[in-house]
Image: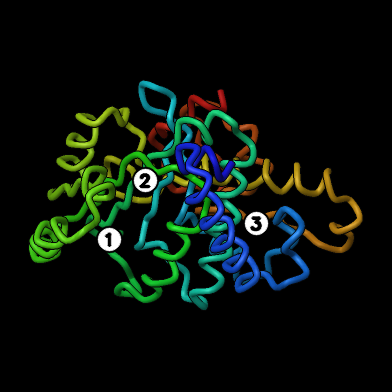
Amino acid sequence: MFLRSNRYDSKAAADQMIKFFELKKFLFGAEKLAKDIVIQDLNADDKKCLEEGCCQLLSTKDAINRSFILFLPGLRSLVPVESEARAQFYLEMRTVRKSEETQRKGIIVIIYAVGEYQDRKKGVGASVFARLATCLPIPVHGIHMCCDDFKEYVILRVGIPLLPAFVRAKFRVHLGTHMEVQYALRGFGIPAGSIPVSPTNSAPLLQNHFAWYLQAAFEDNRAHPTIQKNQSPRPTGFMGVSPAELMVRRPGEKLKNETRVTPLPGDILFG
């Protein structure tokens, strides 16, 4: 895993492995160093971050089958930064651990800070997330920063030349409305409809992420049945939709207590 993420450079892989275990010890403690992190290792705040969808694995892939990791800073939970880091660690390591193809082909990162999705914490914890990015054995082949604040856009454009060359080549900044930046992303192989934001009212569409969470909880509980006793990792539901209703949803169907009546882009995955 570490060799693949460092293009089989053994020295770089060894250095990253050391940093990875130092980070893992910092986030989860020494007793978790020799085991894979599962959902039962997360506390209530960690799970809240994971449920709310600030960081999520998208269901779509690009033309060469690379996965997308999406960050919606406007959905950051008002919990300690360490909880956000543990939730992100779990999601990204689960993604790379479950897929050898992801280890080989890498991922594309999308940071979507448009409109109401601008960072509600104003950049708090940036150093911790930067450490995550360098320590995790995930090859990142593209970073797309989307925003609608012109001042932020100028600062990012000015800062790009200061980045290391290998990061600078992967970094792109997009300025505009929801429609404009999503159209710009299509030029980089990101399929239309990939960003889980409603085209009518910009509300977050978290059904796919919710299904991913339920699947992760189910698989972790099945693999570690002794840990799950008296624990219930299942979230209570997003946007008034219960877990049971979500898993049997049909395209265009209006569920009990749900305010939205238009079909959702993610509906096709549950038809």
Q: Which residue is mark 1?
A: 116
Distance between the alpha carbons at the discs numbered 2 and 1: 19 Å
Q: Secondary structure at mark 1?
A: helix
Q: Amino acid at mark 1?
A: Glu
Assign the C terminus to one quadrant of the image.
top right
Q: Secondary structure at mark 3?
A: loop
The tag on residue 109 is: 2
Precedes in sequence: disc 1 or disc 3: 1
Type of residue at label 2? Val
Q: Residue 171, how many percent across, how many down?
A: 23, 47
Q: Quadrant of residue 153?
A: bottom left
Q: Position of residue 177 (x, y in %)?
A: 15, 48
Residue for point 11% across, 56% down: 157
The answer to whether residue 4 is left or right of residue 265 is: right
Q: Amino acid at mark 3?
A: Pro
Tell me what residue is drawn at x 54 percent, y 73 percent.
Answer: 82
Q: Number of numbered discs present?
A: 3
Q: Is 243 in front, or is 90?
A: 90
Please identify, in this view, whether the residue under mark 3 or under mark 2 is nearer the observer: 2
Is residue 221 toward the left or the right of residue 72 in the image?
right
